[in-house]
């Protein structure tokens, strides 16, 4: 009988101990390209006595749409991965709550596109043109320096772009051309694309196909100019096969208005279970530590001005001067229409 | 009495499963999407029509159905001779070839696309040899579809053919029918059910094909599925996405309905003839040439892209090296989401194992339900249609459906990893059912009746008579389910936990950044996937009882 | 002139000869039984005749014309497989009329012919039946009707009664024989059962390992088996090794059962050796059932035996007898005990041995 009672007490203690010791869980929803250092996340977990559980929802747009669909019953506590082309949509859906993070002080104002602080900028990147150095050297061709030059006969059949209807960099490049050429004047974005079409531009459905299959430096393709990211050359070095080259085989074409800045935001879900922790995690993402980890994890730039860039970036991933930008609301309003017009122009 | 209840419950399980995990989520997402138009404040039917016109639904439907139809024809054209060779002849390495045929099915479209480009695309083999570049054209799509689906035809038709007594054809010839007439009137007629089944499956897969169209079809080829994706994911235009999904489901459903009507009528009871009678080694150079052309030929063709991937995994800009393979075991970025190839393979196999168990557990009672009555009643017809339906569903739509319908207890499964094997079992179920219905229908009723007369009760009858014959069919179904679930279906449509990444997810992960290392590792992981598939299929085939002593025989 | 002639027909599969220089002839209207153990090549023989397996060497002539270039569907031969090969997707009438359809016979004529055929095999009224609902015997009859419907020049039957049980077999054997003769079709009947062959055939050929080792009227084969193999295959009796008794001269053969007088051994005459020839060679001796008697007889040699089993037979009792040899071996044979002949009680199976008497006049020496 005594053994029984002892056992019972022990079991209760154990249970209580277990319940007490069970860590809280912070759920973070990201897109599928999210990555961070192991030690960094574990550090946060330890410091806050929490278990961070990540869920991936596909690419950026897909993830946001899933978040919007689950309004009122959020899939997680924090969302990371809304980019500025979807910002309006994210805000209009009203699924995030404001968080005036103290870390915002370290972030340049121009990146803080949401005055209500529901979406906080974590990183940014540039969609811009990459070129194959070896090709241009071999042919003795000068590398094009402006968008207009791409329409010249000298560069006929050398460009591969992505379909803005199905690809984020594709859309970004289209927006860049719209921003640069506008809808009025001698040369509109539509006449530009007409010229590109006449110049035998190749359209691939996704970045993968464009870069790995059609770009001459990425694989076995034939075209030496591709729409990619400003950090792609740096990635080519970082992810090169041994023996590592000292320099990237590709370079950026930093044409004026030819690159488009994509900012990625994070936010705390309305109705998040662990609101406090969520806020702390957002702060953590904006902290110098995390921000300095971002470049070599996701190959984008940190928003925190105090964060320093790795040598690889300063050497091979210079920030494009004068990137194009469009008002988020404008994008939201006209995106579908622009895409439809582009499709008709270039594909049909 | 007990048995009746048990039978009833077991028949209800697959229906319940499909109800909860297919019909309910789809209904909810469609309702959500179409509500603004058809609901209060909307413009009703006129609005629907306008939306149909705006999205170019008619054109898309034509494209979807057209390429699916052509793909099916081509796949049958390649698969039929191969089925014949596999069914009628014994030749060395036959088991290996059969396992190889199944591998394409599991490969993610992103790497298959790459392999195809290396063969028939820009700067590819075909271009260097003959100036042929077919990427971003319809032929590339058709070719890729044949690549993916020929194993279905060989499996199903070959299995049936392997049980067909060649003496039936010979009887016809002795009665005055020439070779062609005998083939058409007897052999083909008796193969009709399996031909139709495989054609339907291939059509359904091609109809809802996504990755192949996107990667190899290029921007100029759009189908319902790609447009659904675009509208749902990029535009968040739910009404458009919902309408197109509904249209796709409707058309697929109609095809399946037509098929199930015809198949019940065309079903023939066949005595399953042992392999010792139906198969032999090829005699003479003529037959060996036939085996080579129709059996090895397509298999070799299928191997080309696989070989490209394997080669890509060891080719660096400076020469052959194993560094891509060794890098797989390094956490290059020190990422928290790093998954070693072994772990990824374990994850894949675990999820697939679950999916196989689930789809078999549900598929067996489902198949029995469908074949309950010989003539086919309303219940069996509806059941048959229901069990085929997952193949006509868009993965994207289903994923979204899960988000809105599985968000609250008792079904709070949105973020659960269980959804992955569930989704895979969903797609595997039609294949399992199809694999079992054929043999079930062909069991002579006399066999069961005589057993019953001898005093065996129905359950005993099932066990004694059906089991040996169906054992092979079970294994075929298991192999099918396994390959389906290893593939990429719903890899991104569902919420995934990065640390539980399966091999396709890992492959996609590598290809988000440029770099030879990333590309090489993606190729290497593809080879791992191929190996996992090959081993899995081989293991399942190992379980196949050897010999034909029980009178029944090989069902693929 | 013979209707069908095989001249040196050979066929091998992967090194083994299934047919080895087979030469035969068949007259029109004749029913030839091809007998032999499994694997002897009789099925290959049929298939080669049918045109389903082209021979490697030799010719097959039909009415003088070489069939080499004639495909199976043009030969006008019928072939009935052991499993009948009924088309599962057609009903009985459609099965029977299949050959007629291939000929292009108009519908009304077909229907008439089908009726006729079904009447011939006594299956009237089953025209619309599904073939899965047929019993074994019914299936066999439908197969027969189907083969006969197009009036083939030659009908080949591959173990047509093989799939049936013993009682059914006996029953249908008579019917089958009557139908074949009634129709008057030239037929080749392949079987491993001598009873069937004896009942149905005008002539029989025994095959072994691809060769035809003896042909002749069934009676002749039974009366004068040309070799031990034929005797043993036709189960003509017990076969013993026999050597001239040492000392010779008195015409005795030493066998496992004892000494049997050579003078009365009939078969010795076949070898051309004189009955009393002391130099008669060693060989194999056949003890026919009619040599065995259960009561003592004059001139018969007494031998120990054990009754293994008794089966009722229309003519009496069929007894499986084990003759006990001196060396301890037993030699089994089937003996028919007839009430009228031996008189008295029918023997019963027993564990102990009992004497039987062998009449040497009914024993013969065999060729190898």
Image (cartoon, helix red, strand yellow):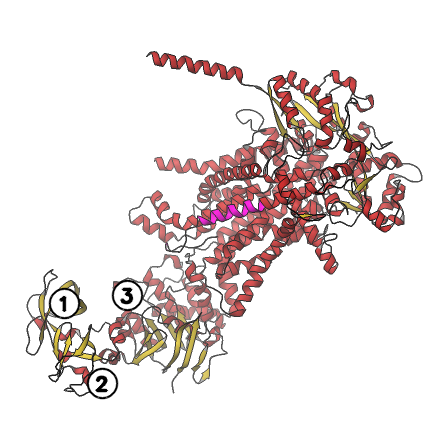
Residue labelled with disc 2: C271
What range of the chain is rendered magenta? B529-550
Instruction: Give coordinates of residue C297: x percent, y percent.
Output: 6, 76
Judged left or right of residue A325, residue C175 is: left
- Horizontally, residue A291 falls left or right of residue B85, namely right
The quadrant holding residue A296 is: top right
In the picture, which quadrant includes the N terminus of chain A? top left
Q: Is residue A270 left or right of residue A145?
A: left
- B84 with respect to C1 (left or right): right
Q: Secondary structure at mark 1?
A: strand
Q: Quadrant of residue A127?
A: top right
In the image, is residue C307 part of the stretch drawn in magenta? no
Name the residue tied to disc 3: C169
Query: Which residue lies under the disc numbered 1?
Result: C324
The answer to whether residue B66 is visible is no
Residue found at x 28% / y 62%: C165
> Counting other residues with Cα less than 10 Å from the Cα at mark 2, is it few (<14), some (14-19), or many (20 or more)?
few
Q: Residue at x 27, y 63 (%)?
A: C168
């Amino acid at each position: 009988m005594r053994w029984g009672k002892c056992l019972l007490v022990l079991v209760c203690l154990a249970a209580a101990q277990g319940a007490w010791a069970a860590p809280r869980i912070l759920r973070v929803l990201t897109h599928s390209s999210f990555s961070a250092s192991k030690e960094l996340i574990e550090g946060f977990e330890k410091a806050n006595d929490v278990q961070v559980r990540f869920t991936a929802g596909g690419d950026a747009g897909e993830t946001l749409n899933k978040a919007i669909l689950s309004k009122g019953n959020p899939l997680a506590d924090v969302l990371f991965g809304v980019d500025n082309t979807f910002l309006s949509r994210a805000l209009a859906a009203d699924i995030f709550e404001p968080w005036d993070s103290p870390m915002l002080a370290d972030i340049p104002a121009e990146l803080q596109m949401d005055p209500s602080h529901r979406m906080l900028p974590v990183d940014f990147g540039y969609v811009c043109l990459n070129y194959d150095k070896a090709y241009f050297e071999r042919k003795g061709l000068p590398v094009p320096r402006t968008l207009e030059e791409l329409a010249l006969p000298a560069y006929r059949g050398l460009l591969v772009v992505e379909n803005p209807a199905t690809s984020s960099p594709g859309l970004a490049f289209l927006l860049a051309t719209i921003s640069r050429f506008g809808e009025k004047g001698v040369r509109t974005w539509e006449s530009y694309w007409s010229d590109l079409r006449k110049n035998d531009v190749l359209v691939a459905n996704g970045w993968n196909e464009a870069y790995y299959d059609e770009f001459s430096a990425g694989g076995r393709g034939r075209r030496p100019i591709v729409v990619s990211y400003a950090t792609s050359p740096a990635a080519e070095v970082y992810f090169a096969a041994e023996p590592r080259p000292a320099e990237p085989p590709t370079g950026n074409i930093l044409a004026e208005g030819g690159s488009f800045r994509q900012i990625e935001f994070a936010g705390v879900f309305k109705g998040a279970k662990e609101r406090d922790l969520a806020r702390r995690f957002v702060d953590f993402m904006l902290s110098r530590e995390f921000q300095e980890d971002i470049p070599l994890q996701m190959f984008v730039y940190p928003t925190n001005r105090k964060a320093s860039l790795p040598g690889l970036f300063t050497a091979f991933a210079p920030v494009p001067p004068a990137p194009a930008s469009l008002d988020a609301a404008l994008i939201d309003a006209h995106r579908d229409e622009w895409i439809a017009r582009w499709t008709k122009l270039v594909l049909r | 009495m007990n048995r009746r209840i048990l039978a009833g419950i077991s028949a209800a399980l697959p229906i319940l499963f499909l109800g909860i995990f297919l019909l309910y989520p789809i209904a909810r997402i469609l309702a959500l999407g179409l509500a603004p138009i058809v609901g209060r404040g909307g413009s009703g039917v006129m609005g629907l029509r306008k939306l149909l016109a705006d999205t170019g639904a008619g054109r898309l439907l034509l494209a979807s159905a057209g390429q699916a139809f052509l793909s099916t024809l081509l796949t049958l054209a390649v698969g039929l001779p191969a089925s014949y060779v596999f069914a009628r002849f014994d030749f060395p390495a036959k088991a290996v070839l059969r396992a190889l045929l199944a591998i394409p099915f599991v490969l993610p479209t992103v790497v298959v696309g790459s392999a195809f480009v290396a063969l028939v695309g820009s700067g590819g083999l075909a271009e260097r040899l003959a100036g042929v570049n077919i990427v971003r054209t319809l032929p590339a799509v058709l070719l890729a579809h044949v690549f993916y689906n020929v194993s279905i035809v060989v499996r199903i038709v070959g299995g049936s053919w392997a049980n067909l007594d060649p003496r039936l054809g010979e009887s016809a010839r002795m009665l005055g029918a020439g070779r062609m007439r005998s083939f058409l009137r007897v052999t083909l007629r008796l193969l009709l059910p399996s031909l139709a089944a495989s054609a339907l499956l291939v059509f359904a897969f091609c109809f809802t094909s996504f990755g192949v169209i996107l990667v190899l079809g290029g921007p100029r080829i759009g189908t319902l599925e790609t447009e659904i994706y675009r509208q749902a994911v990029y535009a968040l235009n739910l009404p458009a996405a919902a309408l197109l999904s509904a249209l796709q489901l409707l058309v697929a459903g109609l095809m399946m309905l037509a098929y199930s009507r015809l198949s019940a009528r065309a079903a023939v009871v066949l005595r399953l003839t042992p392999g010792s009678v139906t198969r032999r080694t090829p005699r003479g150079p003529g037959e060996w040439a036939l085996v080579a052309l129709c059996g090895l030929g397509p298999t070799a063709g299928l191997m080309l892209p696989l070989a490209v991937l394997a080669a890509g995994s060891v080719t660096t800009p400076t020469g052959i090296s194993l560094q891509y393979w060794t890098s797989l075991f390094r956490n290059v970025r020190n990422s928290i989401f790093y998954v070693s190839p072994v772990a990824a393979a374990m994850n894949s196999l675990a999820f697939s194992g679950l999916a196989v168990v689930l789809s078999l557990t549900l598929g067996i009672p489902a198949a029995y339900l469908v074949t309950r009555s010989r003539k086919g009643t309303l219940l069996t017809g509806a059941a048959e249609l229901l069990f085929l339906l997952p193949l006509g569903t868009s993965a994207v739509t289903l994923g979204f459906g899960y988000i809105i319908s599985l968000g609250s207890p008792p079904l709070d499964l949105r973020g659960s990893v269980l959804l992955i094997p569930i989704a895979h079992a969903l797609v595997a179920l039609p294949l399992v059912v199809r694999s079992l219905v054929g043999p079930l229908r062909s069991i002579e009723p006399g066999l069961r009746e005589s057993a019953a007369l001898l005093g065996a009760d129905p359950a005993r009858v099932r066990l004694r008579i059906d089991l040996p014959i169906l054992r092979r069919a079970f294994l075929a179904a298991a192999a099918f389910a396994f390959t389906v679930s290893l593939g990429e279906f719903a890899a991104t449509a569902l919420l995934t936990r990065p640390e539980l990444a399966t091999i396709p997810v890992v492959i996609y992960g590598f290809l988000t950044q440029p770099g030879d290392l990333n590309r090489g590792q993606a190729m290497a992981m593809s080879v791992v996937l191929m190996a996992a598939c090959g081993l899995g299929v081989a293991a399942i085939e190992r379980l196949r009882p050897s010999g034909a002593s029980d009178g029944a025989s090989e069902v693929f | 002139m013979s209707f069908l002639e095989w001249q040196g027909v050979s066929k091998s599969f992967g090194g083994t000869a299934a047919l080895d220089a087979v030469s035969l002839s068949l007259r029109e209207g004749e029913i030839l039984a091809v007998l032999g153990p499994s694997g002897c090549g009789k099925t290959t023989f049929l298939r080669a005749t049918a045109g389903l397996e082209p021979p490697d060497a030799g010719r097959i002539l039909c009415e003088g014309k070489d069939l080499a270039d004639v495909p199976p569907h043009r030969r006008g031969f019928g072939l009935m497989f052991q499993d009948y090969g009924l088309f599962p997707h057609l009903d009985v009438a459609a099965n029977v009329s299949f050959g007629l359809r291939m000929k292009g016979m108009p519908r009304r004529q077909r229907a008439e012919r089908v009726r006729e055929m079904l009447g011939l095999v006594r299956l009237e009224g089953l025209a619309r039946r599904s073939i899965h609902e047929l019993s074994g015997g019914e299936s066999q009859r439908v197969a027969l009707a189907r083969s006969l419907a197009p009036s083939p020049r030659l009908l080949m039957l591959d173990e047509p009664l093989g799939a049936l049980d013993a009682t059914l077999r006996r029953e249908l054997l008579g019917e089958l024989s009557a139908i074949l003769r009634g129709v008057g079709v030239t037929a080749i009947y392949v079987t491993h059962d001598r009873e069937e062959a004896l009942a149905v055939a005008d002539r029989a050929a025994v095959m072994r390992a691809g060769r035809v080792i003896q042909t002749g009227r069934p009676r002749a084969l039974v009366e004068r088996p040309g070799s031990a193999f034929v005797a043993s295959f036709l189960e003509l009796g017990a076969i013993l090794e026999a050597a001239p008794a040492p000392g010779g001269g008195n015409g005795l053969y030493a066998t496992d059962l004892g000494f049997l007088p050579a003078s009365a051994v009939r078969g010795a005459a076949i070898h051309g050796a004189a009955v009393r020839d002391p130099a008669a060679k060693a060989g194999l001796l056949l003890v026919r059932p009619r040599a065995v008697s259960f009561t003592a007889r004059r001139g018969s040699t007494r031998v120990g035996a054990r009754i293994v089993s008794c089966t009722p037979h229309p003519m009496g009792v069929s007894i499986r007898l084990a003759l006990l040899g001196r060396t301890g071996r037993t030699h089994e044979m089937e003996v028919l005990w007839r009430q009228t002949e031996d008189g008295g009680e029918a023997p019963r199976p027993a564990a102990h041995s009992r004497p039987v008497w062998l009449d040497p006049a009914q024993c013969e020496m065999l060729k190898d």
